[in-house]
Amino acid sequence: MQIPDEIRLGAELLGLLATGGTILFKLGRMGEKFEAHSKQLEETKMAINKIEETLQAVAVQKDQIASIREMMTLSTKRTDDTFARIFNTLERQGSLK
């Protein structure tokens, strides 16, 4: 017994439609996965940008702290020099004996 051509063609078309539907379904799922990965990448980029901004602020603060330390060192040296002159002057005048 032979299956009529119309029935075989219909069965093949149903198989083709099922295969096409499966492919479209899988493509849709891949699109969802790409969207999820895209969101994760965007969040990661934002986090990296925040870290870079923080590092820049820390670098500026580090330079400011170094400048303050340098100013304190110079100020201490000037104060030491001033007191050394005062004591030398007092010593020469005989006030420290």
Image (cartoon, helix red, strand yellow):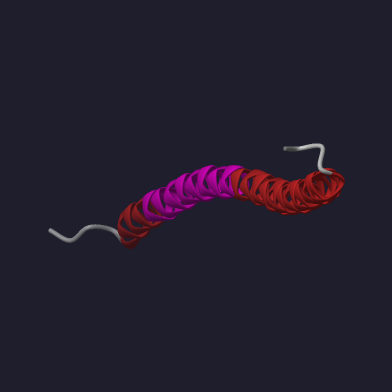
Front position in the image: 43 or 17:
43
Residue 54 position by quadrant: top right
Image position, residue 11 (x, y; %): 32, 53
Question: Horizontal placement of 70 versus 21: left or right?
Answer: right
Residue at screen point 82% across, 37% down: 95
Image position, residue 83 (x, y; %): 79, 44
Residue at screen point 44% across, 48% down: 21
Q: Which residues are magenta?
A: 17-44
Question: Horizontal placement of 46 versus 24: left or right?
Answer: right
Front position in the image: 90 or 86:
90
Residue 5 position by quadrant: bottom left
Front position in the image: 14 or 83:
83
Residue 40 position by quadrant: top right
Residue at screen point 65% across, 50% down: 55
Where, quadrant-wise, is the C terminus in this rendering?
top right
- Residue 39 is one of the magenta-drawn residues: yes
Q: Is residue 97 above or below residue 75?
A: above
Where, quadrant-wise, is the N terminus in this rendering?
bottom left
- Residue 42 is one of the magenta-drawn residues: yes
Which residue extends farthest left?
A: 1
Image position, residue 7 (x, y; %): 32, 53
